[in-house]
Amino acid sequence: MTNALPSVPLERLEPDDPRELGEYRLLGRLGSGGMGIAYLAEGPDDWAVVKAAWRHFSADRDFRARLARELGAMRSLESPRTVRVIEAHLDVQYPWFVMEFVPGVTLRRRVDEQGPLTAVEVSSLALGLAEGLTELASKGVTHRDLKPANVMLSPTGPRLIDFGIADVEGATQLTRTGSVMGSPGWLAPEQITGDEVGPATDVHAWALCVLFGVV
């Protein structure tokens, strides 16, 4: 592969991090969350993002089911406003999957490091996210965890990432009625009360993300 190494914030690999998964050579950590760690990887054809589940989830059937739902939601969209799934390995001891690499930083990192967005950037953010959420709603998907850390600012506009707790219309529910799903500070009222979620839930988070970019 001749493409130059992407210029992205990268943390060094920890001693217990894998160095290779399948055909992918892991170069460093891009970040981590509740479900696992994301790595920048060199693939057979291009750069990619490899997401590996935390090892303590390996025997958790509910976790594996949630991960399968996340991938199903992402694959059902195949949108310019989301990230494409390249391959997945869920029936192994430690599940992992591969996504296309999208250059850019999250909205959270952009504001934390450089301050509020410009007027042009805010307009692109608001319109791009609205377009993405419209596509989600048309496919019966509610993100449920839209926040600045889950919005990637790419050269082609914002991308929605991390569908770990997405609600998919018609899919088997994996959470109990009345449970609170989402990130504190970014929850819609119906998430706090444990009521039914829908497109309006993501619209509430959309407004908060746009406001975050301004202030």
Image (tube, rainbow, N blue to C red):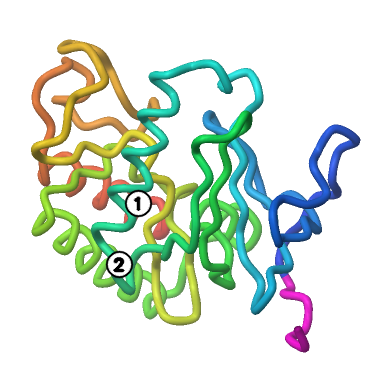
Give the residue displayed 25% in from the left and 17% down from the top.
175
Give the residue displayed 27% in from the left and 44% down from the top.
143
Q: Where residue 56 appears, x then y in whole percent?
A: 63, 18
Q: Amino acid at mark 1?
A: Cys
Q: Amino acid at mark 2?
A: Glu
Q: Quadrant of residue 197?
A: top left
Query: Where is mark 2, residue-wise?
Result: 78
Q: Is residue 142 above or below residue 27?
A: above
**How far apart in space, not on screen, are marks 2 and 1 (Cα)?**
23 Å
Mark 2 and mark 1 residues within 8 Å of each other at the beta carbon:
no
Q: Secondary structure at mark 2?
A: loop
Residue 159, label in figure: none
Q: Which comes sooner in the sequence, label 2 or label 1?
A: 2
Residue 209, label in figure: 1
Query: Which of the two marks, 2 or 1, is nearer to us in this view?
Result: 2
Q: Quadrant of the C terminus?
A: bottom left
* 126 sits left or right of 94 in the view: left
Q: Where residue 9 appears, x then y in whole percent?
A: 73, 60
